[in-house]
Image (cartoon, rainbow, N blue to C red):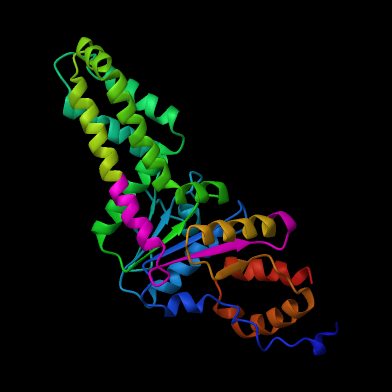
Amino acid sequence: MADEDFDDSDLPDPSLRNIIDQKSLQWVFVGGKGGVGKTTTSCALGVQLAKSRDKVLLVSTDPAHNLSDAFSQKIGRDPTPIQGFTNLHAMEIDANDDMEKLQQQMEHATASDDDDSNGGISALMAELTSSIPGIDEAMSFSELMKQVQSLDYDIVVFDTAPTGHTLRLLSFPTIMEKALGKVMELKDKFGGILGQAASMFGGNGAQMQDMLTGKLEETRAIINKVNDAFQDPDTTTFVCVCIPEFLSIYETERLVQELSKFGIDSHNIVVNQVLFPEKDAEEMGEWLKENNDKLPKEAQDICGKMMARK
């Protein structure tokens, strides 16, 4: 079909302006296959949102964090101010670190004078994480959401891990139900044995189990509350990112279907690496003539190399 015969009048606006304009949004998730530009999209969204919102937070839940590289500054577990902005912060979380902190809290709460008093806790935590895959991420996510909600940001943008990890995030309520069931099963069947074993190591078995059960109950309540908010299209949306290749498009289709099953809004798809060589080169050349002197030297070099390839 010739270009002049193609009617694009009914196509949606090719931008994420709808996210910027929707003032009721509190949570924006950016996800997709690895290497398609999720972090770039997240950072661009965060920067644009910072122009119209009072407080914006970018959160990386990907184990291979890239926010520090994107902003050329060190970003840690706590909200870090982004240079050049007064209302944009970012943080990178690690599920393993959160589980270690939780274990240390439990060890401190149930510790005795015996140096081996933490053996029972370590064994119980190891049993839990090995029996229920994803429980460490679920508890980490719960801690993150508690922290984020207490910081009172207007909107939070999540730079998520590749699709498989993201879909597991959506299954956290189910994971927490399994975790509580597992703990109660251990408590009912082996409560006496665990208590005796913990006492041999100097710990309090009943206190240990009660504390873990309480922590899981708290985590479940937080995740269920957050899950309800995530299913409200007025407060939450999911931006799918892909590139124009079969596997990426196929995985994006699967992601949209899964999001639909969980009742999560996903009406934006970003397609990166779409090139129109002749049109882009012509427009780029005209823009560069007008703006070249205003660009930093690094940008001038990059643009010069791009134009040299046309």
Q: Is residue 109 above or below residue 27?
A: above
Asked whether residue 82 appears in the rendered view, the answer is: no
220 left or right of 164?
left
- Answer with the quarter of the image where residue 251 lies: bottom right
Q: Is residue 163 visible?
A: yes
Percent from the top left, x then y, of residue 37?
59, 59
Residue at left offset 18%, top offset 26%? 207
The residue range painted magenta reads 220-247
Residue 243 is covered by the magenta coloring: yes
The foreground one among 210 and 28 is 210
Most distant residue in the top direction? 200
Q: Nearer the viewer, residue 284 or 22?
A: 22
Q: Position of residue 136 (x, y in %)?
A: 39, 37
Residue 144 included in the magenta stretch of the image: no
The quadrant in which residue 287 appears is bottom right
Question: 29 and 259: which one is in front?
Answer: 259
x, y percent for residue 286:
69, 85
